[in-house]
Image: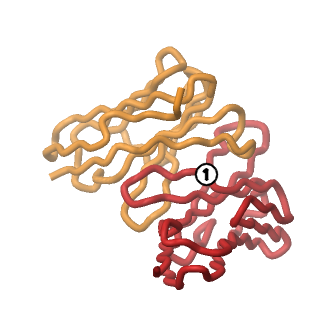
Amino acid sequence: DTGVSQDPRHKITKRGQNVTFRCDPISEHNRLYWYRQTLGQGPEFLTYFQNEAQLEKSRLLSDRFSAERPKGSFSTLEIQRTEQGDSAMYLCASSLGHPGQGSFDFGPGTRLTVT
Amino acid sequence: QKEVEQDPGPLSVPEGAIVSLNCTYSNSAFQYFMWYRQYSRKGPELLMYTYSSGNKEDGRFTAQVDKSSKYISLFIRDSQPSDSATYLCAMSAWSGGGADGLTFGKGTHLIIQP
């Protein structure tokens, strides 16, 4: 296992379409996070899973966003009825235990462009 | 006031110089502090991790945390053009429950001139 992977790496979609992203965490990591990063900004927390349970969601996560981690392994993030403001880099991270233990690893991100 | 403040730069220095990057924060509950390096269009990669106040050194990198001043720093010695990237500070309050994900600064864009 070489790290957190995300698919696709790039996605261009038209406004109003639905998109789904996938994240495969480091296999032994029980915690999985989704972040969004726009140009010139640091990553902003979206949601968090511990195993298969979604334990926290940011107010940034509108009703058009939904995330799942059905078997406590990979996770998907779906955006329905995309808007131009959804254009951003979507980052997945995984950790074993809490972030402060230093094992908080990011994937390469999925760059979404909504036209 | 944002929880974590970081000057976005750009910060341009000549090769070989000592680079100083820093962040201030307002949440006194933060006790875990990290520095990430992010190259353009890539995910962040962890450089340094520090718990509570103090210094930590790893090769050319030194991280400092001053909790009394709510101020953290990253020093890069003998800077190289390959160090050119965006440096993000990140912090966590971890209290044993909840997500306690990381709160990031905006990142400082660093340019090392050959």
In the picture, which chain is orange?
A
Q: Residue at x 68, y 74 (%)?
A: B77
Where's residue B60, x and y in %?
69, 66
Where's residue B47, x and y in %?
64, 55
Q: Residue at x 36, y 37 (%)?
A: A65
Compared with B5, A63 (above or below) is: above
* Chain of the residue on which disc 1 is drawn: B
Q: Residue at x 28, y 53 (%)?
A: A87
Q: Secondary structure at mark 1?
A: strand
A53 or A7, nearer to the observer: A7
B106 or A68, nearer to the observer: B106
Q: Colour of chain B?
A: red
Which residue type carries mark 1? Answer: Leu
Q: What colour scheme does the image use?
A: by chain
* Residue named by callout 1: B46
B70 horizontally vs A103: left or right: right
Where's residue B81, x and y in %?
49, 72
Where's residue B95, x and y in %?
78, 44
B96 horizontally vs A29: left or right: right
Q: Residue at x 43, y 31 (%)?
A: A23
Label 1 packing within 10 angstroms: few (<14), some (14-19), many (20+): many
